[in-house]
Amino acid sequence: MKDRAAWQKKSYSRFWADQVVKYGFDDYCMGLCEMVEKKKPSSVYEMAIGTGWPFAITFYEKGIEVAGSDISELLIEELADRYPGIKANVASYENINPAEEQKYDVVYCFRSTWYFPNLIKALDTMFELAKKGGVVIFDIMNKDSDYIQNIIRVHKWSFALTICKNIIKKVANMLFGKTYLIQDPWNIHELPVSPKIIEQYLTSKNILFHKYSINQVTDGLEKAFVDHGKSNSKVIFECQVT
């Protein structure tokens, strides 16, 4: 995409503001919240905080100090109107200066890293925002998963269908005030990454970490790691900051 950031600010943010609640608070989201809450943090920071739902709001309502950032002015404004006690600002991981920021017990990013063109830069920022002895938790879209690979293949071969859907969505948006997301037929918006890349990065930084597949987050961390299929379409990393 020629300007991914502009698409995220303009098109995707309008779509997400309308759709986020419809995504619900499923077992995966509940499991991610439990991972954070088990650390008993007094403060957390969410990168790509959006409207705050479900993670930031859940933590805030439990008395945890919550801060975060997002690239979209629209989403941050909605969050500020509803939860002014959450300290969120408009910023990309590319222009946050951690030296000027407070440090947090837990820094996390859920369901968003696959929109970051430079995930390693985002992770650098997240680790710098965490306190010593704190934790960084994030999930990735697993490029090695056969489930994700199949989705990518479908995207690549659905050019004509995407064009038709876009025409229908544009008409509905104009005539009925809908906020259907207009896809770029030339590009896949999500950017999956191999867990091996993340493991190499963390090892090079001497960062201790555990990784989990979706089934472990939803059914219990003591479950066996699943290394294929939909249950491994996302991999979650829990990292210790020293």
Image (tube, rainbow, N blue to C red):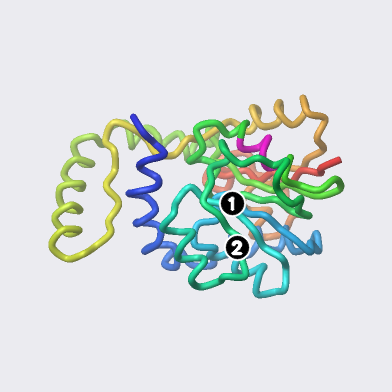
Seen at 62% across and 31% down, the residue is: 120
Q: Up-down: is 19 above or below 154?
A: below
Judge whether residue 151 can be spotted in this image: no
In the current view of this chain or complex, which residue is farthest to the front?
100
Q: Nearer the viewer, residue 34 or 144?
A: 34
Q: Residue 55 — which label?
A: 2
- Amino acid on which disc 2 is placed: Phe
> Which residue is the site of mark 1?
110
Residue 4 placement: quadrant:
top left
Report x, y in % for residue 60. Answer: 66, 70
Q: Up-down: is 238 above or below 49?
A: above
Is 54 on the left or on the right of 31, as rendered? left
Q: Quadrant of the C terminus?
A: top right
Q: Residue 41 — which label?
A: none
- Amino acid on which disc 1 is placed: Phe
Q: Cβ–Cβ below 8 Å for labels 2 and 1?
A: yes
Which stretch is magenta? Answer: 122-127
Seen at 65% across and 28% down, the residue is: 196
Report x, y in % for residue 34. Answer: 71, 63
Q: Nearer the viewer, residue 184 or 74?
A: 74
| 47 drawn magenta | no
Seen at 16% across and 44% down, the residue is: 164
Crowding around mark 1 (Cα neighbors within 10 Å: few <14, some 14 to 19, many 20+) is: some
Is 154 on the left or on the right of 131, as rendered? left
